[in-house]
Image (cartoon, rainbow, N blue to C red):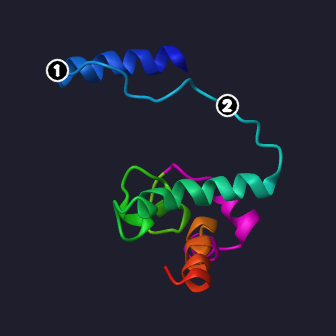
Amino acid sequence: MQAIFNVYTKVFNAKYKQSGTLFEGPFKAIHVDRNEYLLHLCRYFHRNPMEAGMVVKPEQWHYSNYAEFVGKRKGSLVDKDFVKINFGTPEAYQEFVMNYIPPEKTQKELRHYLFWD
């Protein structure tokens, strides 16, 4: 991965006449050993552009396979059996993604009500 990141950084910097690193810190790989964790990661990746304020709905982020997961775009970037086995339907996956409230938002709300800030 480091070699890929280095090559990409060199090409990007040459194209846009910049210098320096594009990626912060060394590459880390984490073993995903539980299905619940895998499902949470899928949800996290699909919600990330929305949480960052880049889109209003996850399917608006064209660089993701979320639209394939929920059946709103035809493409090969989805394992339909994965969705079917874990959620039953694309709509159930969409509900799983959209009805999640990140813990930091819950904590912020609680602080507001407890401390009236």
Residue closest to the eye, 5 or 77: 5
What quarter of the picture does the N terminus occupy?
top right
Q: Is residue 11 above or below residue 83?
A: above
Residue type beneath disc 1: Lys
Q: Residue at x 37, y 22 (%)?
A: 21
The answer to the question of whether label 1 and label 2 lie on touching residues, with beta carbons closer than 8 A, is no
- Residue 101 visible to the viewer: no
Q: Which residues are magenta?
A: 76-98
The answer to which quarter of the image holds residue 73 is bottom left
Q: Regarding mark 1 in the picture, which secondary structure is present there?
A: loop
User: Dot 2 corresponds to which residue?
Assistant: 29
User: Please, what is the three-letter code of the amino acid marked with disc 2?
Assistant: Ala
Q: How many neighbours does mark 1 have within 10 angstroms: few (below 14), some (14-19), or many (20 or more)?
A: few
| 86, above or below 19, in the image | below
Query: Which residue corresponds to the image point at 67% horizontal and 63% vertical from the top-left?
Result: 83
The residue that disc 1 covers is 17
Q: Identify the main secondary structure in magenta.
A: helix
Give the label on residue 65, or none: none
Q: Residue furthest left?
A: 17
Label 1 vs 2, first from the N-terminus:
1
Relative image position of residue 110 (x, y in whole percent): 62, 79
Q: Is residue 111 visible?
A: yes
What whole-number distance in Å separates the C-alpha atoms at marks 1 and 2?
A: 31 Å
Residue 72 pos. (x, y %): 44, 69
